[in-house]
Image (spheres, helix red, strand yellow):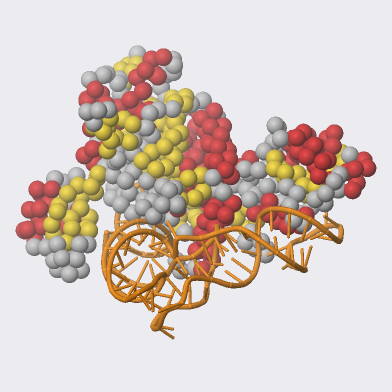
RNA sequence: GCGGCCGUAGUCUAGUCUGGUAGGACGCCAGCCUGCCACGCUGGUGAUCCCGGGUUCAAAUCCCGGCGGCCGCACCA
């Protein structure tokens, strides 16, 4: 970390998370807790739930998608068909002497200049190593234990321990359920299926809290379309003047370019893809991330997932650099084609009287990463005390009800008001310490509004609303309280 | 997995070199005082000193192994 300011923000988020109940390491009290597993605490659960609700509203509902909730354990054949058994692997080898682990494909490529596809078989790689006399780069030791490290968690199901795997991405459920959903939900191409849930990857080296975990939430959207008609997409019309922030392959800067220009110049291959890229960029703008911190970066062949034919990553700039939040992949016919071959079920569907194998464009969102970015984006360390300037629709606690004095009759009156509000808002009651201390404590976890019950309340049934972002106060009649809060929360 | 640094209450940390089983600050809890933006008073709670093994009469401290964290390499949502 070159800038101290950077690590400070990350550290502050982690401190806040641990101290105030956003998230914490799983199995924390045991020494053998493996890395990469995190528990959400009470405030974190609320934030995550609100983020997912936002995703549902702004993407699933806005676009009229169908949502499913699939099993996390999937059979071996699913991953034979998807290619994950064979391709979701890193070819690795170990140095006999210093035990350094190498990515074989990268190592051979570096030493010989020969392009080595990740999927080249091990025999072939072994031959290349012998032919070119490749040794450990650090100590010159012999390379041993050539193997494929598969990043999926394998399970044994039932007494016979049948092979199955925890899904490494949520979308496979969508592909294997596609046929039934298409038959029963009466949708014509193009249409989208969405799913939010857990995925699992046995990362070699999980790190940086919520940013790279072994068990994590994805919110995925798979758009099924007729590849010949990716440009016949009227929904995209209103988006044509919307400015995307793109970082095309081979360019160092991010450009602002309208969908129309991006299509005309061939930067984006179809109106359908332009539409969904716009939708996802708008999503993060609405989530409170400023435009300059958002970009869609085009991936080259060396970076793309094995199933992708065209790929853009939506990234958000944080103190830790640009973080990939959404993989926007054109998966082509890879998935339905694979499942058609392996399952024997025909995946082609009728579109205007013609049978087509739908292609897939996906928006594969990392939920936990998004939550980190939203937290960091909201964190303001300018003043003496940290303030979490969360958009109100993400605030885990919307309203705090505080008696000015922690004694009667202020406390009774405050509890009464708390009871009045608690079913309609996320409310917390607190009477401990001085009023100023409580304001700051609630600022720290992003509560947009505090309600204070003071001397005047007892006389005329009015309360003070105190706002997190301005520290301004507003006196409101109890009869109008709920309405006023609602307006301010937006 | 590798390399560098690191691991002591909820948080930050003193003590580690020079072994004698932990001290502070903030927080939290209770009471008092004040009464609209933390840092008034009193009392209190709170630490498997990351885990395991070894050396020793004695280990937070020394040695070995492991786990975890940060940064870098690599990988990814």
The image shows residue B35, relative to residue A185, as above or below, that is below
Q: Position of residue A173 (x, y in %)?
A: 36, 28
Q: Residue at x 49, y 40 (%)?
A: A280
**Is residue A115 visible in the rendered structure shown here?**
no
Q: Residue at x 55, y 52 (%)?
A: A17
- Left or right: A161, with A477 as reference point: left
Q: Residue at x 84, y 37 (%)?
A: A478
Residue furthest right in the image: A459
Q: Position of residue B9 (x, y in %)?
A: 54, 60
The image shows residue A383, relative to residue A377, as above or below, that is below
The image shows residue A13, relative to residue A138, as above or below, that is above
- Left or right: A32, with B32 as reference point: left
Front in this rendered view, residue B63 or A338: B63
Specify the quadrant that holds the C terminus of chain A.
Answer: top right
Front in this rendered view, residue A272 or A421: A421
The count of marks equals: 0
Quarter of the image holding residue A343? top left
Q: Position of residue A24 (x, y in %)?
A: 49, 50
Q: Residue at x 24, y 36 (%)?
A: A83
Q: Position of residue A374 (x, y in %)?
A: 55, 49
**Is residue A40 visible in the rendered structure shown here?**
yes
Specify the quadrant that holds the N terminus of chain A.
Answer: bottom left
Front in this rendered view, residue A260 or A279: A279
- Left or right: B66, with B61 as reference point: left
């Amino acid at each position: 970390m070159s800038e101290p300011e950077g690590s400070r923000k990350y550290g502050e988020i982690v401190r806040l998370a641990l101290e105030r109940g956003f998230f914490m390491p799983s199995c924390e009290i045991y020494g053998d807790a493996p890395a990469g597993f995190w528990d959400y605490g009470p405030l974190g659960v609320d934030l995550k739930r609100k983020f997912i609700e936002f995703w549902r509203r702004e993407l699933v509902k806005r676009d009229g998608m169908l949502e499913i909730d699939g099993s996390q354990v999937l059979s071996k054949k699913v991953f034979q068909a998807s290619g994950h058994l064979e391709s979701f692997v890193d070819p690795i080898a170990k140095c006999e002497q210093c035990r350094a682990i190498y990515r074989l494909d990268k190592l051979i490529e570096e030493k010989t200049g020969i392009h080595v596809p990740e999927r080249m078989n091990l025999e072939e790689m072994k031959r290349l190593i012998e032919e070119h006399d490749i040794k450990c780069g650090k100590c010159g030791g012999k390379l041993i234990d050539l193997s494929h490290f598969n990043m999926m968690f394998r399970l044994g199901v039932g007494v016979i321990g049948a092979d199955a795997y925890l899904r490494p991405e949520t979308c496979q459920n969508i592909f294997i359920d596609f046929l039934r959903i298409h038959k029963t939900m009466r949708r014509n191409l193009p249409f989208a299926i969405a799913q939010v849930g857990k995925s699992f990857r046995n990362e070699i080296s999980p790190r940086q809290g919520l940013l790279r975990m072994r068990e994590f939430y994805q919110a995925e959207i798979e758009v099924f379309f007729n590849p010949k008609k990716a440009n016949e997409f009227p929904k995209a019309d209103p988006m044509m003047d919307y400015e995307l922030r793109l970082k095309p392959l081979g360019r160092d800067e991010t450009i602002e370019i309208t969908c129309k220009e991006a299509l005309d110049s061939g930067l984006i291959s179809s109106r359908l893809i332009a539409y969904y890229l716009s939708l996802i960029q708008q999503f993060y703008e609405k989530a409170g991330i400023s435009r300059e911190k958002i970009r869609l970066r085009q991936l080259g062949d060396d970076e793309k997932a094995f199933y992708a034919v065209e790929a853009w990553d939506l990234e958000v700039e944080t103190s830790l650099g640009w973080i990939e939040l959404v993989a926007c992949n054109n998966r082509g016919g890879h998935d339905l084609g694979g499942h058609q071959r392996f399952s024997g079920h025909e995946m082609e569907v009728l579109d205007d009287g013609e049978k087509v194998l739908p292609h897939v464009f996906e928006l594969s969102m990392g939920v936990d990463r998004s939550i980190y970015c939203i937290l960091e984006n909201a964190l303001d360390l300018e003043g003496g005390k940290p303030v979490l300037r969360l958009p109100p629709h993400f605030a885990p606690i919307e309203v705090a009800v505080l008696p000015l004095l922690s004694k009667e009759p202020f406390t009774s009156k405050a509890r009464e008001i708390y009871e009045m509000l608690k079913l309609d808002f996320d409310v917390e009651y607190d009477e401990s310490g001085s009023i100023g201390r409580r304001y700051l404590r609630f600022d720290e976890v992003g509560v947009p509004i505090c309600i204070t019950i003071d001397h005047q309340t007892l006389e005329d049934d009015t309360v003070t609303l105190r706002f997190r972002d301005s520290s301004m106060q507003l006196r409101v009649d109890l009869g109008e309280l709920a309405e006023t809060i609602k307006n301010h929360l937006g």
